[in-house]
Image (tube, rainbow, N blue to C red):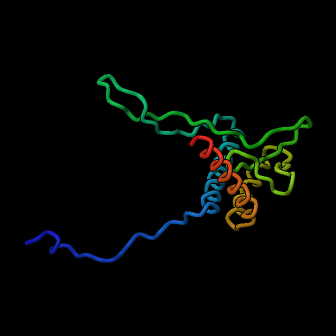
């Protein structure tokens, strides 16, 4: 008896994931905002924020590659100006996300108010309020990457 005859076959296929640039950029931004929230909480508690990252680079004594956990560097999204006011900048594709033309920074005031602001930003991104700005930034990132590919070819 054939093995295929014993199996129950179907025409089912996995559901396609959303692959458009806007949803990918939105998900990345949500991840970055959650990471910033963790980082500011750690800063307010007075501890160092070092999220782990698993890398398979090192070799053990027998010469085999081993997965090692290392600390990942996370860029801080806030800064203080000369007056001591805290400002926050969201980044898409490594560049500041302009919320209005020429305005990318959000004035927070003090560092203890930043977690509430990050929660509001996460809610706004999930609701799609920043989709036009994210779409524009993702398109600019795509153009930059296509130009880079053209130069390399």
> What residue is at 37 percent from the left and 27 percent from the top?
59
Given the current orientation, which residue lies at the most extreme top position?
61
**Residue 117 x, y percent position in the rendering:** 77, 54
Q: In which quarter of the image is residue 116?
A: bottom right
Q: Quadrant of the image for the N terminus?
A: bottom left
25 in relation to 147, above or below: below
**Residue 141 x, y percent position in the rendering:** 68, 51
Q: Could one spot residue 33 in this view of the protein? A: no
70 in relation to 77, above or below: above
> What residue is at 71 percent from the left and 63 percent from the top?
123
Q: In which quarter of the image is residue 49?
A: top right
Given the current orientation, which residue lies at the most extreme right position?
83
> What residue is at 80 percent from the left and 49 percent from the top?
113
**Residue 130 x, y percent position in the rendering:** 74, 62
Q: Quadrant of residue 10?
A: bottom left
Task: Report the front residue among 119 and 28.
Answer: 28
Determine whether, in the image, residue 72 is placed left or right of residue 116.
Answer: left
**Residue 42 x, y percent position in the rendering:** 66, 40
> What residue is at 55 percent from the left and 66 percent from the top?
18
Task: Report the front residue among 139 and 33.
Answer: 139
């Amino acid at each position: 008896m054939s093995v295929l005859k014993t199996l129950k076959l179907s025409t089912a296929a996995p559901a396609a994931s959303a692959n458009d640039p806007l949803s990918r950029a939105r998900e990345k931004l949500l991840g970055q905002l959650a990471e910033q929230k963790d980082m500011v909480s750690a800063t307010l508690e007075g501890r160092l924020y070092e999220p782990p990252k698993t890398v398979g680079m090192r070799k053990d004594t027998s010469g085999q590659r081993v997965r090692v956990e290392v600390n990942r560097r996370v860029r801080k999204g806030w800064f203080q100006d000369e007056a001591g006011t805290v400002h926050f900048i969201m980044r898409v594709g490594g560049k500041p996300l302009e919320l209005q033309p020429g305005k990318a920074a959000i004035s927070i005031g003090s560092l203890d108010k930043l977690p509430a602001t990050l929660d509001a930003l996460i809610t706004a991104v999930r609701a799609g309020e920043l989709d036009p700005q994210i779409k524009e930034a993702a398109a600019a990132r795509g153009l930059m990457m296509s130009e880079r590919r053209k130069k390399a070819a």
